[in-house]
Image (spheres, grey):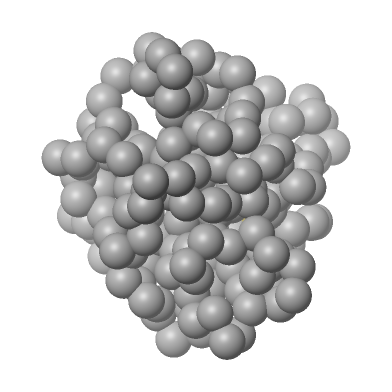
Amino acid sequence: MTDGQDKHLPSGVRRQVLRGLCAVGLAFPAAPRAQSVTGTASPPAENDRLVFAYGERAGQAIAPGDLALGAEQVFAYPMDPLTSEVRNGTRLNQLVLVHVDPAGLSEQTRARAAEGIVAYSAVCTHTGCDLTDWDTETKRFQCPCHESQFDPSDGGRVVGGPAPWQIAALPLKLVDGMLAVAGEFEGRVGFQQPGLDPLGGLGT
Ligand code: FES
């Protein structure tokens, strides 16, 4: 987890608490927020810049060098380059970025990557928790609620747990040396479970 995110509870304990809350429908755990959610809810658009979502650098543009190879994910939002408005009006625009070994990327994922950086929706496709955990050995996103795992090197595909489909991928490119959006989400953002609305009723 990045600066400003909660590390107070041991991960095992936090996972148990989150599982319990999800089981009774009390929580869709979200990454702690260091800035208010006032931006637009319109979806990412080509040429949007990516900015840090939380911490001391919230709102600042992200360069490839800000992400260490193999390190845990950084949370980000797209920002309209013309208005500087951050598209953080909905959780559905929240992204997780990681720097993965380019040699291990699937062909499709390589086409979406910028200097080894890949971007995905931060919303787990099972019941909508934020993908706040990272398996340092396998280099995979792990959901804190029911331990679904997603492979960022291979299109965000599900490699464990109850998630029904892969996380949506957002193509990237570089503009003036900074990370930017190269196209629309590829795949389905959000989640859908019996008894819950499509996109999880996440709202904003
Ligand atoms: S919300 Fe259940 S595994 Fe992510």
Q: Quadrant of the N terminus?
A: bottom left
One can see residue 88 in this view: no
Of residue 91 and residue 24, the one placed in the foreground of this image is 91
The residue lying at 75 percent from left, 47 percent from top is 186
Left or right placement of residue 107 versus residue 104 in this view: right
Of residue 143 and residue 173, the one placed in the foreground of this image is 173
Query: Which residue ends up furthest to the right in the rendered image?
Result: 194
Of residue 63 and residue 91, the one placed in the foreground of this image is 63
The residue lying at 54 percent from left, 79 percent from top is 102
The residue lying at 26 percent from left, 54 percent from top is 2
Q: Give the answer, above or below, for where 12 lies relative to 89.
A: below
Task: Find residue 47 and report its horizontal and vertical position in percent.
Answer: 54, 35
Task: Find residue 168 and report its horizontal and vertical position in percent.
Answer: 69, 49
Query: Which residue ends up furthest to the front in the rendered image?
Result: 176
Left or right placement of residue 204 versus residue 3 in this view: right
Q: Quadrant of residue 103?
A: bottom right
Of residue 26 and residue 162, the one placed in the foreground of this image is 162
Left or right placement of residue 166 versus residue 24 in this view: right
The residue lying at 59 percent from left, 68 percent from top is 152
Task: Find residue 71 and report its horizontal and vertical position in percent.
Answer: 35, 72
Task: Find residue 61 and report its horizontal and vertical position in percent.
Answer: 31, 40
Q: Quadrant of residue 148?
A: bottom right
One can see residue 176 in this view: yes
